[in-house]
Image: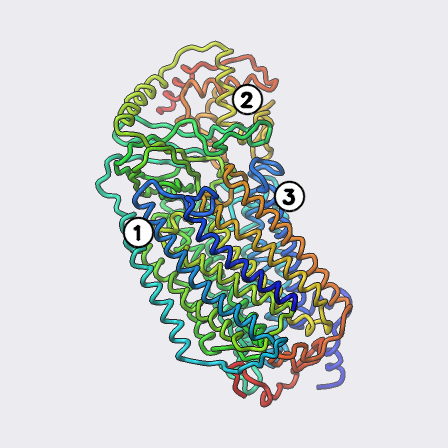
Amino acid sequence: MESILRHLRVSGFSIRLLILMAFTSFSHGEWGLNMTESATAIGREIHGLHMTIFYICVAIAVVVFGIMLYSIIRHRKSLGAEAKPFHESTVVEIIWTTIPLVILVAMAIPATKTLVAMYDTETSDIDIKVTGYQWKWRYEYLNTDVDFFSTLTTTQDQMQGLEPKSENYLLEVDKHLIIPINKKIRFLFTAQDVIHSWWVPELAVKKDAIPGFINESWAKVEVPGIYRGQCAELCGQGHGYMPIVVEAVSEEDYQAWLITQQKAQKSANQVSKLSFDELMAQGKTGYDKNCAACHQVTGMGIPPVFPALKGSAIALGDIQQHIDIVVNGKAGSAMSAFGEQLTPTELAAIITYERNAWGNDKGDSIQPAEIVSFKQAQGQ
Amino acid sequence: MTTMTSEHSSAPATGIRRWLYTTNHKDIGSMYLIFSLVMLLIGGSMALLIRSELFQPGLQLMQPEFFNQMTTLHGIIMVFGAIMPAFVGMANWLIPMMVGAPDMALPRINNWSFWLLPFAFGMVLSTLFMEGGAPNFGWTFYAPLSTTYAPPSVTFFIFSVHIMGISSVMGAVNVIATIMNMRAPGMNYMKMPMFVWTWLITAFLLLAVMPVLAGVVTMMLMDIHFATSFFDAAGGGDPVMFQHIFWFFGHPEVYIMILPAFGIVSHIIPTFARKPLFGYHSMVIATSSIAFLSFIVWAHHMFTVGMPLVGELFFMYSTMLIAVPTGVKVFNWVATMFRGSMTFETPMLFSIAFVVLFTIGGLSGLMLAIAPADFQYHDTYFVVAHFHYVLVPGALFSIIAGVYFWIPKWTGVMYNESMGKFHFWLSFIGVNLTFFPMHFIGLAGMPRRIPDYALQFADFNMVASIGAFLFGLSQLIFVYNIIQCIRQRGCPASPQVWEGAEGLEWTVDSPAPYHTFQTPPNLDNLRSPTGHN
């Protein structure tokens, strides 16, 4: 008896949770219970579909579990219930086959409409090519010179619990993807190495970035603001560390940003001579951001997958070989080619740092110009 | 039959030889079940490691690389090592007894298909100690992460999958041969118990898709070692083709893990409702429809890979259709309970929880079928919540229910009922505490397979981790209860065991003699599953 009562309470528990979920959905997800509200019209349609199908599911659950609960309460042997041995009814079977079918057709119609709209990538205002790398994103604004990488800025110390976690822990990057509001932005997705998936919940865009293929999707953001997302397809050990930050701004701000960005892009490729101390300082910043996830801040790596740089044959060996592996990566390993991801100045600083940090003390330094000539010799 | 041979065949050999050389379906069934329990505990420990790391934001226990190895091995071990062998173990024990056969049709193959498994999983686990670590690309092992970018241990992983596949195919052949050829006279197809029916259909699914899995891992092997480019665009291949082939196996695989569960529950609910199963014929039709549909829905796992619009629509519609036969099954179970005379022993509690929680998993599956919405759900914790609802309180609960239901028949001893109920309530609360909040964090935007997460997901992750430990540790009660039965500690069980139990397996002694139905049983007095005599 007691166990039955407890049973009732707990069976009711999941139903109540479902209903609770339904009610709290009105509270704009501040409890983090429901799908994110969207900044695009398509996103709102999807949200509407989600809520509709959710309510249908709740209704089905209430009816089915309700009848079941009623039987569990009323049709118990301990209450003297006698079993009625009915066990077949074609009419009933036809009814409960037909009703779900009707509900499904009713649901399929709006879903099809939304899907058709999502697939309409024609007549875009701006085209942006998005390339997934292990483990960062590259954004190329087609028909402009703007082309940059966007990398996580959360520090290793925050991850390891050595310093407090920032507000946007793991969802912050060095360079935002800037887009204007009320323009149809077409995204072209591809990847350099493995499959990634570009997802920003508030834009309602999720599409796989597949090496060797181009996928399309689009968004027209109506509300200015910063929208954060993450890679959604397992892409190796850094999968949790390649967030996406989209900043939607006014058309004027976007144009102004585009111009400064183009200028900055040009000057980044110009090289000047740096002192050893400048190289080491910039090198540490660059190393911690780009290399430490695998080779670790301490340079100890995680052997055997990620070799130590402290005392390594490459870091203490021939400079050209060292430049080569950083610029071109190592085929068949997680070491990616940083040649096009980083500026010559950043590369020179990082290589200098690797040759002199952690007691490597090689004493030599590499100037940005050497990187430029190395790449030129390779025909890059 | 001479006295000599009958002595040989009636008593089991002693010592290790009994288990190594046995061709007895009951011994092999027991070995499968024990193997599955061990794998459940190993895979479960890995789940607890994962949940410990996710208890709060930040990296506390392990590096992301090891985290990925844990998620991969947890998935592989639970799917291929825990759930599937448990069902094969039950098939071995029960199908011959349910159809009135003396043993499985192919006893030596039966022995071999079991003994392949310890080697396959020994090899999988040994990769943890290899240079470069264990497979780290998820249980779905998408190329090229699992080919060009995989650790060297992937080759051992591929070989293990081949061995598991061979084992499964042989098991399936055996089940089909037994059911088709060894039914007692008078037991036609429409008189077969539901567990036998669901397993027959499952076996055909296995036969159809395990070779596909073997094919796809072989293609990986070629890409890795023989310079082919099946999944490498640079050589004319296509990484998405991997996913199509994988899910052509993978979706029927999902039903391989749930159809026998439907069978088990279809035995337990009528027993404790003291009523025949409602809609036996529609159950058979629904199961067959689900099996058919499982072959034409695979790409709903791939709505975001960039399929053409018509492809998306086709797979959305076909997937939504699955709700119809699945709904029929749930309605039938509820109708079976309706106007019954119910009692709530442990197997019934687990079965009722199965119906409720599997239905919740099915409903979230219906949500996932809506392709536009799936763009938001895909690869988030919403999906993790969905498939754990159908696999843990779904498949696993049905297995637990089945073990409590039939263990008196297997060991001759009643399990401890109050411990069983205690086990149920802790499991029920634990499983919901673990997986229900995952719906919320998924909808709020947390991707799956990440070792660390943004701060807004922290609260529900903590709840899920606490639930996981509650659920995981309460399984020790189950283990204890099983061990007590095996050690013959408890009340002896009658042949009938349960007041409302129907079927041939309840006509033999408890424990079931080493050899049963050496002469075919007479079915005249047996009520058929359709409720008619």
- On the same chain, marks 3 and 2? The answer is no
At 61% from the left and 36% from the top, the residue drawn is B60
* Amino acid of disc 3: Phe
At 36% from the left and 15% from the top, the residue drawn is A270
Q: Label 1 belongs to which residue?
A: A115
| Residue A311 as seen in the image, left or right of residue B331 | right
- Give the camera-side residue of A140 and A310: A140
Q: Label 2 belongs to which residue?
A: A315
Residue B313 found in image quarter: bottom left
Quarter of the image with the C terminus of chain B is bottom right
| Residue B11 as seen in the image, left or right of residue A72 | right
Q: Chain of mark 3?
A: B
Q: Chain of mark 1?
A: A
Callout 2: few (<14), some (14-19), or many (20+) C-alpha neighbours within 10 Å? many
Q: CA distance from mark 1 to mark 3?
A: 47 Å
- Give the camera-side residue of B365 and A273: B365
- Give the camera-side residue of A27 and B205: A27
At 35% from the left and 51% from the top, the residue drawn is A48
At 33% from the left and 54% from the top, the residue drawn is B312
Q: Label 3 belongs to which residue?
A: B129
Say above or below: B177 vs B214.
below
- On the same chain, marks 1 and 3? The answer is no
Say above or below: A96 vs B236.
below
Which secondary structure, mark 1?
helix
Which secondary structure, mark 3?
helix
* Amino acid of disc 2: Ala
